[in-house]
Structures are given as C-alpha cells and as structure tokens.
Amino acid sequence: MLSLRGQMDLLLVFLAALLTAFATGLGALPFAFAGKGGAGSRRLALGNAAAAGLMLAATAMLAWEGAGIGPLSAALGAAGGLAFIKLSDTILSRFRHLDLGALSGSDARRALLIVGVMTLHSAAEGIGVGVAFGDGAPLGWFVTIAMAIHNIPEGLAISLVLVPRGVSWQAAAGWSVFSSLPQPVLAVPAYLSVLWFEPLLPAGLGFAAGAMAWMALADMLPEATSQAPLWQVVSVLAVSVAGMLGLFALLPGG
C-alpha cells in the first residue's frame, strides 16, 4: 500500500498530465472569435491543408524523438501506425451512412479519424509524462509544460477539421480534450513502472508518427488539392509546418 507521500505523488502526476489534456482544448479558442466562417469547399480545403501541416510537423518531431531513443522500435511502431489507420479508414469507408452529431458520411469519417489519430498520439505523450516524472519532479514539470504548449496546435488541427464542417467551437474543444485523455490515464502507470514503460516509448512515438503521416498525406492533402488551387494549399501547408516547428524550436530543449 502506498504511503500518503506516494499517493500525493501519484495525484501530482495525474493532475500534471490532465493539465496537458486540457491545454489541447485551447486550440479551439480562435474559432470563438472568428466563427465558423461557412463551410465552403475552399475553406474546407485550406483548413485541411493547415491541419495536415500541423500534423506533419508533429510527425517529424515524434519520429525524431522516437528514433533517438530506439530507432528499430520507432520504425516498427511507425509501420504499425500506418497499417492501423489504413485498416481503420477501410472499415469506416464501408459505413456510407455514418453519423457523428452534426456530421455525416465522409465528414463523420474524417472527424473520427483525426480524433482517433490524435488519441493514439496522446497515449505516447502520456507515457512520456509518466516516465519523465519517474526521473524526478523537475524533469516531469519541464516535460509537462512543454507538452501542454505543444498540445495547443494539436487542438487547433482538430478544430480546423471539425469547425468548418458545422461543429461548434465548444464541441471541437471538447473533442480536443477527449483526444488527450490517454495522457493522464497512462501517465500514472508509466510513473509507477518506468522500467517497464520506458522501452515502449519509442514504439509509441513511432506508431503515432506513422498514423499522423498517413492521415495527412493520404487523406487530408489529397482532398485539399482537389478543392483549392495547389499554390494556396502548398502555401498554407508550408506556413503551418513552419509555425509548428518554430514553436517547437522556441521551447527549452527543443
């Protein structure tokens, strides 16, 4: 049985990881002021391009971090992520009358995929928070703060897909937070069993990277280029990638 000090430490790890989950919801805040702006095909296309750019930048960071810890595990994880999302998309495509709140058909499928991809991604982040606290509170808080900041554009990526399709910004914020709930759930067991969870981290990072890369390259960008001029899609993509990578570079240790 854990001592009172041990129980407090567990609560601290859980609350720290929960903070990173709630930070994801902040990505929907710009839509509270900008509004939905209509669901025209061009707006949807550029929203897809911006979300894809954020996801590709996150993919690069995840792959780099995973390869630095365990190259083979990260590569195998990435292959698993690609296969999993491809299989999920194939299964969802069979449901022609899929409904998800205000969304239906292909819009509902895309919403489920991006929320699913981000949820898989956050599982690896939750393990990262728990492992970091296992090495000491200062490192744990450093990783927590960096991850909370990093999660905001991920919430924005989700919102860029959901809001232009008719989902309210409040609901988009809720789905963003939901996608990050694996972080507090997995942070505690990772903290308790650092030696067991730490080897899983590179595979988890690779899995998330593979899933996000497939979603961006095989789904979101092709739709974007079919609905908007290529130069506009490429411009938005480049700005979002540069913005995400620039944010990461500004973080301590980035």
Image (cartoon, helix red, strand yellow):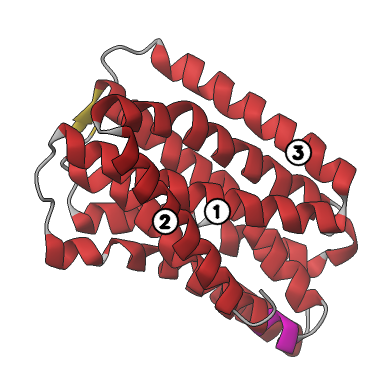
Task: Answer few, some or many: residues within 10 Å of disc 3's Cα (few below 14, many 20 plus, some between 14 and 19).
Answer: many
Question: Overall secondary structure of the magenta stretch?
Answer: helix
Q: Is residue 210 left or right of residue 168?
A: right
x 73%, y 62%: residue: 189
Q: Report x, y in % for residue 244.
A: 49, 62
Answer above or below: position of 229 versus 21: above
Magenta-highlighted residues? 137-141
Query: Is residue 102 in view?
Result: no
Among the two numbered marks 1 and 2 on one chain, the one whose residue lies closer to the N terminus: 1
Answer above or below: position of 26 versus 98: below
Q: CA distance from mark 2 to mark 3?
A: 25 Å
SS at mark 2 in the image:
helix
Q: Report x, y in % for residue 48.
A: 34, 40
| Residue for badge 2 | 240
Q: CA distance from mark 1 to mark 2?
A: 8 Å
The circle on residue 57 is 1
Q: CA distance from mark 3 to mark 1?
A: 18 Å
x 79%, y 68%: residue: 192
* Quarter of the view holding residue 131: bottom right
| Residue for badge 3 | 77
Among the two numbered marks 3 and 1 on one chain, the one whose residue lies closer to the N terminus: 1
The front one of 88 and 48 is: 48
The front one of 90 and 47 is: 47
Q: Are marks 1 and 2 in contact (CB under 8 Å)?
A: yes
